[in-house]
Image: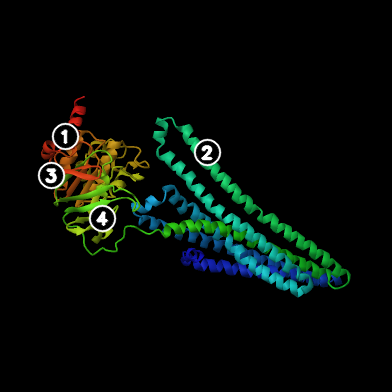
Amino acid sequence: MIKRLVSYLRPYRKYAIAAILCVAVETMFELIIPLIMADIIDVGVKYGDKTYIFERGALMVACALISLLLGAGSARFAALSGQGLGAELRKAEYRKLQSFSFANVDRFRTSSLITRLTGDVTTIQNAVCTGIRPAFRAPVMMITSIVMSFFINAQLAIVFLIAAPLLGVLLFLIVSKVRPLYSKMQGAIDRVNRVIQENLTAIRVVKAYVREEHEIQKFTDGNDTLRNTSEHAFRLAALNMPAMQLIMYATILCILWFGGRLTQVGGMDVGALTGFLSYVLQVLNSLMMISNVFMMLTRALASGQRILEVMDEKITLTDDEAKDVSVERGEITFDHVYFKYSPDASEYVLSDISFHIPAGQTVGIIGPTGSAKSTLVQLIPRLYDATEGTVLVDGRPVKEYPLRHLRDAVSMVLQKNTLFSGTVRDNLRWGKEDATDEEILAACRTACVDEFLGRLEKGLDTEMGQGGVNVSGGQKQRLCIARAILKQPRVLILDDSTSAVDTATEAKIRQGLAAALPGTTKIIIAQRITSVAHADQILLLDNGRISAIGTHEELLQTNTIYQDIYHSQQEGAGL
């Protein structure tokens, strides 16, 4: 896992190497200082040689200044490499998310994907920014200090051989307990984010049903779970410091005891003991740094595992069978198509669907709520793949078209209309990036957007709030239709996309589409029969199966389900 995560550091490798070199050299200069200090005491102070004291003191200051400069350099280079790694991870993960099919997205909650893309990446980024220095400084400091300690007094340095294993055992016990808790903590953050996202997305529903207290309680429950999990994890992690300090101070006491006895019998100079203690502190500090690095690494690995779960997700929709072909006419055929969202599902959502739509025809799809009308049309641009059977466009299975070309030829106005932050013009140009204002205004006239465009504050330059909150539902639908028209597709799918407009405006849009896109195959899903009565043929779906296919007049004469829908709507219109 670490190797894979570090591979994203490649463009910033020079900064990481520079940070490591700065740390290594800085540490070496710092470790010279205790030797100089020992010389000052044992030579300069002992013999009263002031010149020697000042010369060695100046050398100590120079070493300290060089260490300071190298420390600043290591911090800068570590920050550059850490921020770069975070940026590369975010880019790679976001690119992977863009290749997800609906089925892939369904396996992760949106809140979890956001946390993995932001919080988990930030954890790894911070681990690199703050971890490079101690991770490489501590081993150099520890090894060099131990060597110098043995050089000063080998008998006294044996104390390290007892302290180091004790520290290692304690660190292993703490890390093994904390690591699974960090994973649980990130999951708890996912749940808190989900509650917040759902609440903000559905804030109007919450207000309308006066459910603020209920939502507050939901958030409180999730927040308490996060707090309890975090407290448990950090409580164990906090044991790291006192455990290290206990062993560190016990080691110092032992060295003072044995070292003091050695100075009394003449086996060791006071200056040497002072220098030895400096190296002891360096060794123990380095061990504490290593333990902190392990704790930081433990949390980063928990986040890294969650990121790699996204990166390793197998894409369900690929171009493996694609050929160098594109949609020319817009002819559509369903050949005994079956579909279910999950391979483990017991029942099919669509069963034995077969029909043919010649290029340029207008086809209506109608049926009771829950009859899988939207699911049916989502198989055409391969938002999902058929479980069994074949969906063909222009006589070719849709899998033979590159996804990009197929979806570029099929324009779909979804049941849930979506507008993005930016101006009206920016949103409409999603249909055609280089569209001129004349083309945009022509599409607006076709979709009856011109009826309200002049009332917007700045016309095409009016800023849309997030999700298009500053326009009504009907206006949003018309903007989405105009966006689809700009694409000039071979197949246009309107998934109940005129439900929020009145019948007169809907008739205008219908006439405008016929004039603006004469050769385009149009598929209209609707709840109102008046929306599809003009179609060349109408597909009546019932419980995931085709109940009947025919014109409005034919179905009105022969199909009881269609008759029931028609008469109920006629009665409703008369009320």
The quadrant where residue 40 appears? bottom right
Mark before the other along the chain sequence, 3 or 4: 4
Mark before the other along the chain sequence, 1 or 3: 3
Foreground: 273 or 323?
323
Distance of mark 4 from mark 1, alpha carbons? 31 Å
Mark before the other along the chain sequence, 4 or 1: 4
Q: Which residue is mark 2?
A: 220
Check disc 1 and report its element: helix, strand or loop: helix
Question: Which label sits on residue 563?
Answer: 1
Distance of mark 1 from mark 3, alpha carbons? 18 Å
Q: Give the amino acid at mark 3.
A: Asp
Left or right, residue 298 beside residue 209? right
Q: Which residue is mark 4?
A: 388
Going 19% across and 27% down the picture, which residue do you hit? 571
Q: Give the amino acid at mark 1.
A: Gln
Foreground: 430 or 120?
120
Q: Residues within 10 Å of mark 4 (few under 14, many from 20)?
A: some
Q: Give the amino acid at mark 2.
A: Thr
Left or right, residue 431 beside residue 332? right
Q: Which residue is mark 3?
A: 536
Check disc 3 and report its element: helix, strand or loop: loop
Q: Give the amino acid at mark 4.
A: Glu
Percent position of residue 7, x then y: 47, 66
Percent position of residue 426, x then y: 31, 47
Callout 2 touching callout 3 (CB < 8 Å): no
Foreground: 417 or 213?
213
Q: Residues within 10 Å of mark 2 (few under 14, many from 20)?
A: some
Percent position of residue 24, x then y: 62, 69
